[in-house]
Image: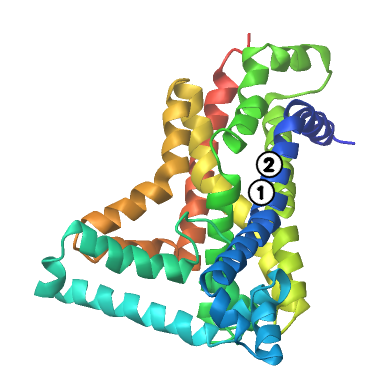
Amino acid sequence: MSQVGKLYKFYFGKIWQKNWLRIIIFTILIGIVWWFVMPWALMKAYKGSMEATHSEAYQNLTPEQKKGWEKANSFSDGNRLRFGAWGQDEFKKWNRERIEEYIKKLQEGDEEVKKLGFNEKLRTIYGWQAADNGSAFLVSTPWTADNCFFFTQTEGYDKVGGKNFWQMLFNISWWNLCSFVVLYWFIFEVFDKTFFSPRREGEEATVLVMTPGIKRSDIIWGKILAFLTFYFLINILLFLIPFGIYYFWLASVKDFAWFSLLTLITVIVGPLLFFGLIFAPYLFLGSLVSGGKWIFSTLIAFFPVIWGGLKLLISASWPYTLERTFFDPIWFTVISLVCGIFFLALYYLRYQEEDLN
């Protein structure tokens, strides 16, 4: 086995050894509670509220009508109805058309739009986007718009070769990475314990001195491969497995090839691009200024909220244009790769010149 392979196994084992409790907690909170317990509890609460509010009307329903109401408000069939039945696609299409119409008015400088106050803008933009994204918390849930289109495979997403299909896969992957996994006190903490703590604690110096044939470049690549493997696996635990359960349980049309593409982008491609865009700059900047790591990671963690607030506060179309351009699969891939190569090269040069002792 090569030296890089040995270091990869060593650091991968260290990641699980040092972070096993965090991994268990997040797997339970997100993989189980968020995906399954919360939807079930909300469905039960909604059903109970409807029964209490419309108890008299419910009693007047025929047995067949009662059966239909129970089915629509059960966890299994109620969610299944979200994915295709009762005009789901038409509702999502209507939301998207309203958003596009509003953006067009912004671009044309419509006076009525400019005169809208903060509260009106909040109701107008945020309401439609929350309905379209399926969540006001900026996280990917089984019933977001893109997920529903993926499940029902309609409205422009029925052709695998089309641009919209790839954009949808990137959207799902991006929201997953941004919302579920890249939390500064979890993934950034794991990253710190993999790249920075061993140097601070003298572990790397010991490895170099005590292990014949080990080079500094071997340590870097061993750590990167170990962290990326962890990143791939945690995406499988926190997103792919729960999403897959919903897909094969509730989807109106099941296609393993479609799900395989989502798996590839979400579990492999997405983390690689995110590593280049976020973690490579974080690695280099963190090696320069130790205190800057906390600022950088916190800004990244809360950036979706900051960006969403910016779009609400200003009456301009450029944030939407910038967002659509930046998150286009081609541009996002190019930017991430260039950013990753540039900052990794800077870190590599700095790391090679530093005295680990």
Residue 187 seen in the current view: yes
Residue 284 appears left or right of 258: left
Q: Mark 2 points at which residue?
A: 26
Quick one: 62 or 10, which is closer to the camera? 62
Task: State which quadrant residue 210 falls in.
Answer: top right
Total numbered labels placed on residues in the image: 2
* Cβ atoms under marks 2 and 1 closer than 8 Å: yes
Residue 346 seen in the current view: no
Q: Give residue 216's position: percent from left, percent from top.
A: 68, 24
Q: Which amino acid does label 1 sit on?
A: Ile
Residue 62 appears left or right of 302: right
Task: State which quadrant residue 74 falls in.
Answer: bottom right
Please give the name of the residue rendered at 28% of the width and 68% of the height, measured from the top-left corner: 124
Residue 146 appears left or right of 262: left
Quick one: 253 or 157, which is closer to the camera? 253
Q: What residue type is labelled 2?
A: Phe
